[in-house]
Image (cartoon, rainbow, N blue to C red):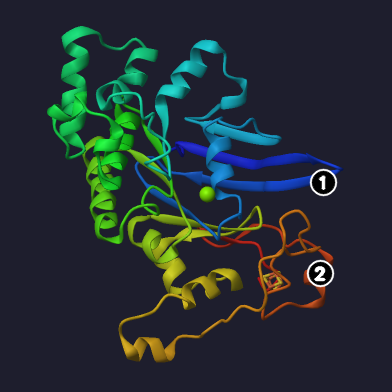
Amino acid sequence: DKPILEVKKLKKHFHLGGGRVLKAVDDLSFAINRGETFGLVGESGCGKSTAGRTIIRLYEATSGEVLFNGENIHKLNAKNKLQYNRNMQMVFQDPYASLDPRMTIGKIIAEGIDIHKLYTGKQRSDRVSQLLNDVGLNEEHAGRFPHEFSGGQRQRVGIARALAIEPQFIIADEPISALDVSVQAQVVNLFKKLQKDRGLTYLFIAHDLAMVRHISDRIGVMYLGKMVEVTTSEKLNAKPLHPYTQSLLSAIPIPDPDVQKKRVRVILQGEVPSPLNPPSGCPFRTRCPHAMKECAESMPPFKEVETGHYTACHLY
Ligand code: SF4
Ligand code: MG
């Protein structure tokens, strides 16, 4: 089966003036299979949100390709562009900022329905009621305003809005990181349930590998605008290849002391370099415990080291 989404050498560079260029997303390549959850992780500022926004075309790509169901989205005509917009929706990080405070919940949820002229009148209000129920709210909520809801409830509204036009693919950009810990699991479970019921595919963006590895089928790890490793959650847990991934994993506490004892701890030196002035060669070399001479000289290619396991590191 063809992947639902293929990203090929995607770049998003921002020209900041004074000749400074922020290479927020630099040469990203990966694919997402239909029906899976692909977790995209990395520290803040690594470019993961920019990648999501470029894929959904909130930003125009600097170069590279995005294929959705095999079609290059940068070459779509107007009609297919509208269809693409219907098939891909985004859930944003901040459930406070992403809902218009002057609009009722019903109006917010129905926005896409109205734009795409899918339903009117009773059909439209039935659809909104159904969506509210699907995300664990109820139809009485339709006439209320965002400030009347908690963070977790608002994020449910954000999810209902994304689902309203029945997309195949949802990009969720840190959808739980602004929520209280007590409601995070509930929202994650809602994502899982909706995926099961609707056959959705997710690109799930997160800085927290501990959380994302539990809900993702496969994971991509980004560092300073580059993808450094892609593989299944199991392989990433059992045998991470890239030293950066190893450091992220070794920072997650393990409840079992015997397992904890056996694990190699990788403590990173120094800070993340400025993305405006990344190191030559491998971007991770200033913090990598294994850095060698060639790491400063050339950027390691992103390649398949074992079946389905990709990494960019001169050790392999
Ligand atoms: Fe470390 Fe070199 Fe591999 Fe980069 S290429 S992660 S510096 S060993
Ligand atoms: Mg972000």
Query: Residue shown at 39%/79% (left/top)?
Result: 253
Position of residue 260 in the picture relative to residue 250 (left or right)? left
Q: Disc 1 marks which amino acid? A: Arg
**Taking 95 as reference, is 292 above or below it?**
below
Q: Nearer the viewer, residue 274 or 243?
A: 274
Residue denoted by label 2: 296
Q: Disc 2 marks which amino acid? A: Ala
Q: Nearer the viewer, residue 64 or 102?
A: 102
Tag 1 secondary structure: strand
Residue 183 placed where, x, y %? Answer: 25, 55
Corner quadrant of residue 109: top left
Q: Nearer the viewer, mark 1 or mark 2?
A: 1
Residue 242: tell me if it is visible: no
Dot 2 alpha-carbon crowd within 10 angstroms: few under 14, some 14 to 19, many 20 or more: some
Image mark for residue 177: none
**Taking 199 as reference, is 109 above or below it?**
above
Residue denoted by label 1: 20
Residue 181 placed where, x, y %? Answer: 30, 61
**Taking 73 as reference, is 288 above or below it?**
below
**Taking 208 as reference, is 155 above or below it?**
above
Q: CA distance from mark 1 to mark 2?
A: 22 Å
Dot 1 alpha-carbon crowd within 10 angstroms: few under 14, some 14 to 19, many 20 or more: few
Position of residue 213 in the picture relative to residue 160 (left or right)? right
Position of residue 272 in the picture relative to residue 37 (left or right)? right
Corner quadrant of residue 217: bottom left
Q: Which quadrant holds the N terminus?
A: top left
Q: How many marks?
A: 2
Q: Which quadrant holds the C terminus?
A: bottom right
Query: Residue shown at 31%/42% (left/top)?
Result: 155
